Amino acid sequence: MLAMLKSGINRYWGVLLILLLWQAWVTIGQLNAIVLPQPVNVLVDLVIDPRIHTANGIQTLALAIAGLLLGMTFDSLLAILCWFSRLATGMLVPLAMIFSSAPIVALIPIIARLLGYDIKTVLAIVVIVSFFPAFVFTSSGMRALPPGAPDLFEVLGASRRMRFRHLVLPAAVPNWMIALRLAVSSAVLSAMLAEYFMGQSGLGYLFRQAAGDFDMERAFGTSVIATVVSVVTFTLSQRAERAVNTRWR
């Protein structure tokens, strides 16, 4: 037991330091709970009513994962289309730049007017946020071929389709995993942001409701859950990237 405690402290000492500084700030500054609640009270709210956090957290996570997978799949297909067609490259690359430059907050009302103020809009926002990383990294991976490999395939008389299947597509997999790692945390954040502005459930909606009622313990608890979800999804995607790279290389 003592060894486990020591291992936990060594691993999570940074989190413990933040909690101690948080508690000291509240105590020394004699801050009201509306301004900044005590970490113990936030923990109590999480423990007393875990179902509300769990249900909304699962919804946000499910929407983030579904939107991420849809966005990565759709954008990978567009990257493949651009590899086969220069015309598609000239049409799609400017659109990708426009979508990546537009603030996501400005897109939410437009998408909501088109799709409605429900889960479909949240899903669409996550798909849009996932667009640029997948498109850019997949496209770059399809062009970062091993030295000499294109010449070898040309000497062997391989068709364009064979080069794509046996050379280009495998070369893009490591970059695709990088895009997945970079986009996964943004997917959770964008799902929460969409829920905050127009959702009827989820972590973003729960945070807005709690902040509007000045229930700061619940608002901070929701933030803690969102942080945990983002860290866990990022860690899992990082491990998946390492596993794929180890096998691929």
Image (spheres, helix red, strand yellow):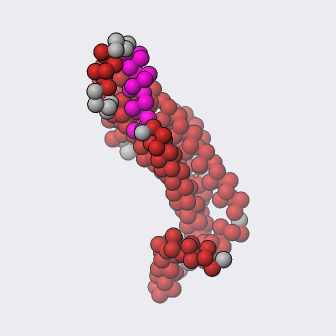
- Residue 115 at x, y percent in the picture: 55, 34
* Quadrant containing the C terminus in the rendered view: top left
The quadrant in which residue 119 appears is: top right
Q: Main secondary structure of the magenta part?
A: helix
Relative to 173, is 206 above or below? below
From the viewer's side, name the closer residue of 197 and 38. Answer: 38
Residue drawn at (47%, 47%) of the image:
242
- Residue 132 at x, y percent in the picture: 39, 38
Left or right: where 183 falls relative to 219: left
Relative to 28, is 172 above or below? above
Residue 241 seen from this side = no
Left or right: where 96 falls relative to 68: left
Asked whether 171 falls inside the magenta stretch, the response is yes
Residue drawn at (61%, 45%) of the image:
62
Asked whether 7 falls inside the magenta stretch, the response is no
Relative to 222, is 173 above or below? above
Residue drawn at (51%, 86%) of the image:
27
Relative to 147, is 10 above or below? below
From the viewer's side, name the closer residue of 90 and 30. Answer: 90
* Quadrant containing the N terminus in the rendered view: bottom right
Point out the stretch of residues depicted in magenta: 160-176
- Most distant residue in the bottom direction: 28
